[in-house]
Image (tube, helix red, strand yellow):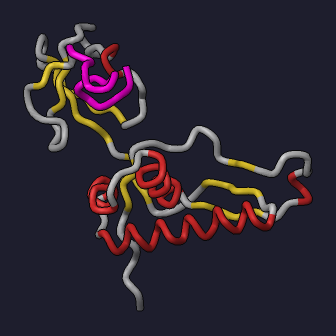
Amino acid sequence: MPRPPKTRFVEDLPYISLFKPMGIPMRQLEEVVLSIEEFEAIRLKDLEGLEQKECAQRMQISRPTFQRILVTAHQKIAEALIDGKAIRIEGGNYQVTKRHFRCASCGYEFEEPYGTGRGCDMVCPQCHQKTIYRVDSDGGEGMPNRSCKRRGHGHDGEPS
């Protein structure tokens, strides 16, 4: 009996979950289903341009597993484009990654999923101050969310 697949971590869910060829009613189209983790692999590798090792680390899977997910995603997208099929993005074995924050003013701790897009505008839900810093492993301890100098991003990596 094969072991159950390991949960893959994704930073954000897609805003749009269906793409289809223009001018053809959906009822006349076949669909290709792209899982959320396949979507995330495409986003990390092809859109963000990261190396496979870093992509795998961000999804908390091995590099060979990431490679298999990416190849499957590319095959499904190619099939949809070549054969004129719709692409539906849904399902899979995933969990949305959360970032952990602490307010330097009042000490309140909270979590936010990736992709909230609040960046430098983030305020403490309790005291409404902008003295927020990341306390999770990849964000660093004690980095107040005050500067947005890194390519237009705040310390939490979100667009400002």
Vertical position of residue 153 compared to residue 131: above or below: below
| Left or right relative to 30: residue 79 | left
Quadrant (top left/top right/bottom left/bottom right) for the C terminus: top left
Near-viewer residue (29 or 79): 79
Q: Give the range drawn in magenta.
A: 146-160
The residue at the point 27 percent across, 23 percent down is: 154
Residue 34 position by quadrant:
bottom right
Q: How many marks?
A: 0
| Left or right relative to 132: residue 117 | right
| Residue 159 at x, y percent in the picture | 38, 25
| Residue 56 at x, y percent in the picture | 31, 61
Q: Residue furthest left?
A: 142
Near-viewer residue (126 or 45): 45
Is residue 145 a member of the stretch shown in magenta?
no
Quadrant (top left/top right/bottom left/bottom right) for the N terminus: bottom left
The residue at the point 31 percent across, 65 percent down is: 61
Residue 73 position by quadrant:
bottom right
Vertical position of residue 92 compared to residue 148: above or below: below
Residue 52 position by quadrant:
bottom left
The residue at the point 34 percent across, 45 percent down is: 97
Is residue 153 a member of the stretch shown in magenta?
yes
| Residue 129 at x, y percent in the picture | 23, 8
The residue at the point 56 percent across, 59 percent down is: 91
| Left or right relative to 67: residue 104 | left
| Left or right relative to 61: residue 82 | right
| Residue 22 at x, y percent in the picture | 85, 46
Q: Main secondary structure of the magenta part?
A: loop
Vertical position of residue 62 compared to residue 107: above or below: below
